[in-house]
Each structure stands twice: as C-alpha cells, then as structure tokens.
Amino acid sequence: MGKVHLAGIVVIILVLAFYFGDFALAKSETHSTARVGALKNANATFYTGFCVYPDSPFGKLVAGELMSKGYRVLLLSAPVECDGQFLAVWVEWSNVSYFPVFARGEVRVVAIYSSAGDPSHYLRYRNATNKKRALIEFLNTTEPQVQAYILADISDESVGIISVRGYHNYLLKQAAEVIAGQVQDLELEGKREKSSD
C-alpha cells in the first residue's frame, strides 16, 4: 500500500509539473509568416522608442524583444497618444495539441502601429463592428506618419519534454520576435525613405 501511495504522489507531482511548470526541453520546427499593410506619408514623423499596449503577457514579450534590440519601451495601461511609436498587440487566436513529449501549435497575433504615437487606428478598430475592414483601412491624419497593421502566423511542432505553459510561452515568444522584427523593419525603411527625399 505504501508503494502505491508513493507512486500516486509521484504521478500527481508530474502532472502538476507538466501543467503548471514553465519548461520546454525540445527540438522545434517553427515557421512564421507575416502580412503587413502600411500607409506611409511623405516626411513621416518617427518618435524614438515605443509605447506598447496592452499591458499583457504577450505585450510584455513584444516589449522585451524591442528592448533587446536597444529601444526604450513604455508599457501603456490604456491606448493613449504617447511620445513614442505606438504599438498595440494582441493574440487573435491559438490552437494547441499537447502531449508531454510532443506538441503542435498555431497562433495568430496582430499589431497596429503608428510611427507618431497616434492610437486612432487602433481605437477605431477596437470600436468597429466590421473588425476586418477597420484593421486594413487607414485614416488621414494631421501629422505625417507611417501607419501599419501586422498579421503574423506562427506554426510549430516540438518533440521533447515540454510543459503546457512552457509550450504556450514558446509560441508567444516566437510571435513576439516576428512582431518586433516587422516593426523595426517599418521604422528603418521609413527613416531610409525620409532621408533619401
């Protein structure tokens, strides 16, 4: 009876570790695609640093990626105008099939960007009944800027010792890298075009 009781405790500990733990010792095959739509005004304003909304786990991952690239980052608690480049980010959907030694997942993340710290595109999107249309349509603004949306899809298959939380965090980290890279490309391309005018 003692051995059965001990085995039961070990099983419970393992289940809890794989569910609540944050580890991924796995070999992963990850693919990403990003679709970017942008409106670039002549002589666009580019503020230094970024204001990232929302203050969420995914938003914090994107902020961390931007900081690792050398940017100053402010996490916003509300979508307000700021003195940095505005970036709203969120997870649109995710789908994960999980076993402790194999996981397969897909996630789509979305970002709305303004080089001049203007949240109006995001606010219009958030309040729209037709979200798809509001995402891809840009407004004329008084201040010249680069406005953009980014749709990023990440798909992955991982084999190894993986926890549920660790796998979700891995997918979101990959998505955050894609968003940060796309935003950096928008900034560099916009500044290059502005300097060549």
Image (tube, rainbow, N blue to C red):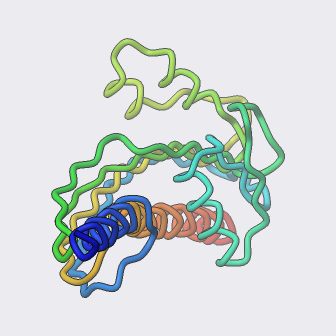
Q: Splitting the image into 4 quarters, where does residue 117 fall? A: top right
Q: In the rendered view, does 128 fall on the left or right side of 30?
A: right
**Residue drawn where x is 54% and y is 49% of the image:** 40
Where does residue 115 sit, x and y in percent of width and height?
66, 50
**Residue drawn where x is 21% and y is 55% of the image:** 96
In the picture, which quadrant includes the N terminus? bottom left
In the picture, which quadrant includes the C terminus? bottom right
Q: In the rendered view, does 174 fall on the left or right side of 63?
A: left
Q: Splitting the image into 4 quarters, where does residue 119 fall? A: top right
Residue 20 against residue 156 in the figure, above or below: above
Residue found at the very far top of the displayed protein: 129
Q: In the rendered view, does 98 fall on the left or right side of 53?
A: left
Which residue is nearer to you in this view: 23 or 64?
23
Residue 83 against residue 102 in the figure, above or below: above
Which residue is nearer to you in this view: 6 or 24?
6
Which residue is nearer to you in this view: 18 or 75?
18
Where does residue 37 sit, x and y in percent of width and height?
39, 47
Q: In the rendered view, does 120 fall on the left or right side of 111?
A: right
**Residue drawn where x is 26% and y is 65% of the image:** 8
Residue found at the very far front of the displayed protein: 1
Where does residue 156 sit, x and y in percent of width and height?
21, 70
Where does residue 3 sit, x and y in percent of width and height?
24, 76
**Residue drawn where x is 59% and y is 66% of the image:** 193
Residue 55 against residue 100 in the figure, above or below: above
Total labels: the figure holds 0
